[in-house]
């Protein structure tokens, strides 16, 4: 049996990346279907570190408060040397990554909870994830794309304007689109990880045996899910070992040898193979990629899910705007802005992983702590310093203020002079619109219907934006600065937005 249905966007893959994109599109009134080949929703910790910039995205989407309910309280991480001696007790993720950041360095929540709160939010927009849908291929033409999907007992053709592959490193969408996945596989670096129950180990701290062959072995209690999350290096030779509790127990016995500790009741188990790969393009006509479908890298610094979520957030407003009649060339800025980010993440995670691997247990503890406190020598893992300076969407009017076009718009408090109310800038940004901030008394320029204008007073806002006398800042729907300067004319904003105009 064959069905033919229509929508605006088909998303393949219902992990955090696909769900973020689906939520962003759905709240903008874009018809979307999101399919996943799994027969049931996955469980397990998997990606657990929600970094600062991703917390901003989730706050805008309306899921951060709910996710916080599932987050683990900041706890102690205990590092051991090769002889089993404790060398460091550190609290890893509690400090804000940059001054003034409204979030901790990382929100430690199991991926199962991240996906659950995103699905709940998506359902509030009238969209549900369609499980058991295996994407098998597509055809595209000048007007749209037809995705072939197999559900149990039937084949369906889904006609859409665009198809987005958020289906992971083995992406079928990427392969069917003929997009190269360039890089290398580190055959000798594999990790066994998952969730299980641990008996006989202190559950008030996370335990990390950082020194030893093959990488770190760790066991972290996850009280919100009632399990422990573990990582363990697999032997460099072989490859046919069973993925089992017994396999992990054997590695633990050989590596740690701590008596009285036992393991049982696995929730999920998986083997992670280290790959360093990225696409040579993010788009083939009406087919786009996001997340691990476009880039994979070592896990040092926990950048995978966070980079993918930010891919989706960059793409969502652009895709929605094109569907409303903006020039399709706007989609070219997705690759323009996100590909350099992916390349940087690949380079820095490789360097960071090698830096950690070359250290003893005490040094690893100090280096990991420094990474999440914003003292990493390779990059800012919070994502808060990420910028799109030089993008074709970034226009600097002059050097009259401190922030630059392409920067992330910082949070601050000030007074909205139109209402006299004390406001938080992130509250003004929240939603699907552009936001125009005016500092000082210079007359406001002409702005479009989807631009909300606020004249802001107050020392904190002026300081964060580097304003002395006056300034203009146009903030994109994804929280980045589109236009900035200390002086402007009546047409500055309208001229910027004209090439992005919708019908």
Image (spheres, rainbow, N blue to C red):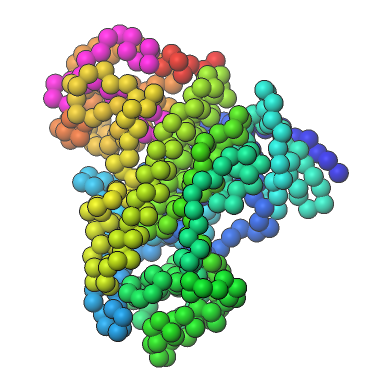
Nearest to the observer: residue 241 or residue 396: 241
Quarter of the image where the C terminus is located: top right
**Image-based side of 13 in relation to 312, left or right:** right
Above or below 378: residue 259: below
Q: Residue furthest top?
A: 490
Give yes or no for residue 125 being in the magenta stretch: no
Inspect this view and state whether residue 295 appears. yes
Above or below 446: residue 93: below
Whole-percent x and y of residue 496?
38, 16
Q: Residue furthest bottom?
A: 259
Whole-percent x and y of residue 433?
43, 27
Inspect this view and state whether residue 90 appears. no
Whole-percent x and y of residue 374?
24, 52
The quarter holding residue 256 reads bottom left
**Image-based side of 249 in relation to 379, left or right:** right
The quarter holding residue 390 reads top left
Residue pictured at 78% horizontal, 35% vertical: 4
Above or below 71: residue 142: above
Residue pictured at 31% horizontal, 63% vertical: 356
The quarter holding residue 391 reads top left
Whole-percent x and y of residue 459?
15, 32
Quarter of the image where the N terminus is located: top right
Q: Residue furthest right?
A: 1
> How many tags in the picture?
0
Residue pictured at 43% horizontal, 31% vertical: 336
**Image-based side of 451 in relation to 119, left or right:** left
The magenta stretch is 467-496
Give yes or no for residue 472 being in the magenta stretch: yes
Nearest to the observer: residue 252 or residue 124: 252
**Image-based side of 57 in relation to 398, left or right:** right
Residue pictured at 71% horizontal, 41% vertical: 137
């Amino acid at each position: 049996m064959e069905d033919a249905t229509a929508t605006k966007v088909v998303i393949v893959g219902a992990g955090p990346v696909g769900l973020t994109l689906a939520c962003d599109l759905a709240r903008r009134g874009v018809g979307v279907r999101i399919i996943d080949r799994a027969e049931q929703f996955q469980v397990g910790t998997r990606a657990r570190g929600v970094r600062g910039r991703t917390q901003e995205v989730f706050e805008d989407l309306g899921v951060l408060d709910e996710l916080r309910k599932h987050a683990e309280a900041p706890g102690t991480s205990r590092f051991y040397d090769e002889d089993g001696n404790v060398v460091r007790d550190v609290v890893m993720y509690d400090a804000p990554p940059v001054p003034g950041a409204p979030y901790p360095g990382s929100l430690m929540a199991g991926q199962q909870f991240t996906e659950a709160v995103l699905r709940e939010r998506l359902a509030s927009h009238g969209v549900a994830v369609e499980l058991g849908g295996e994407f098998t291929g597509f055809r595209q033409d000048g007007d749209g794309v037809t995705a072939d999907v197999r559900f149990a007992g039937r084949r369906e053709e889904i006609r859409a304007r665009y198809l987005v592959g958020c289906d992971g490193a083995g992406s079928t969408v990427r392969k069917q689109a003929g997009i190269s996945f360039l890089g290398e596989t580190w055959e000798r670096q594999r990790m066994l990880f998952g969730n299980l129950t641990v008996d006989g180990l202190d559950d008030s701290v996370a335990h990390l045996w950082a020194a030893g062959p093959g990488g770190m072995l760790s066991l972290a209690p996850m009280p919100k899910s009632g399990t422990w999350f573990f990582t363990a290096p697999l032997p460099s030779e072989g490859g046919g070992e069973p993925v089992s509790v017994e396999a992990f127990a054997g590695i633990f016995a050989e590596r740690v040898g701590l008596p009285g500790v036992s393991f049982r009741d696995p929730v999920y188990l998986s083997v992670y193979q280290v790959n360093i790969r990225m696409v040579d393009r993010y788009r083939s006509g009406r087919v786009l990629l996001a997340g691990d479908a476009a880039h994979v890298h070592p896990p040092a610094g926990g950048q995978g899910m966070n980079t993918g979520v930010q891919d989706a957030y960059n793409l969502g407003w652009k895709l929605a705007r094109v569907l409303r009649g903006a020039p399709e060339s706007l989609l070219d800025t997705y690759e323009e802005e996100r590909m350099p980010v992916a390349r940087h993440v690949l380079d820095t995670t490789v360097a960071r992983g090698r830096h950690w691997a070359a250290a003893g247990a005490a040094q690893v503890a100090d280096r990991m702590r420094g990474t999440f406190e914003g003292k990493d020598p390779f990059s800012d893992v919070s994502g808060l310093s990420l910028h799109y300076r030089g993008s074709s969407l970034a226009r600097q009017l002059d050097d009259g203020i401190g922030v630059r076009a392409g920067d992330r718009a910082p949070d601050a408090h000030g007074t909205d002079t139109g209402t006299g109310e004390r406001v938080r800038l992130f509250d003004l940004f929240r939603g699907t619109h552009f936001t125009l901030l005016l500092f000082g008394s210079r007359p406001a320029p002409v702005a479009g219907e989807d631009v909300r204008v606020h004249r802001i007073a107050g020392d904190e806002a002026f300081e964060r934006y580097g304003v002395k006398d006056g300034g203009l800042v146009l903030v994109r729907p994804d929280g980045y600065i589109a236009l900035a300067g200390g002086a402007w004319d009546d047409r500055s904003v309208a001229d910027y937005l004209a090439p992005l105009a919708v019908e």
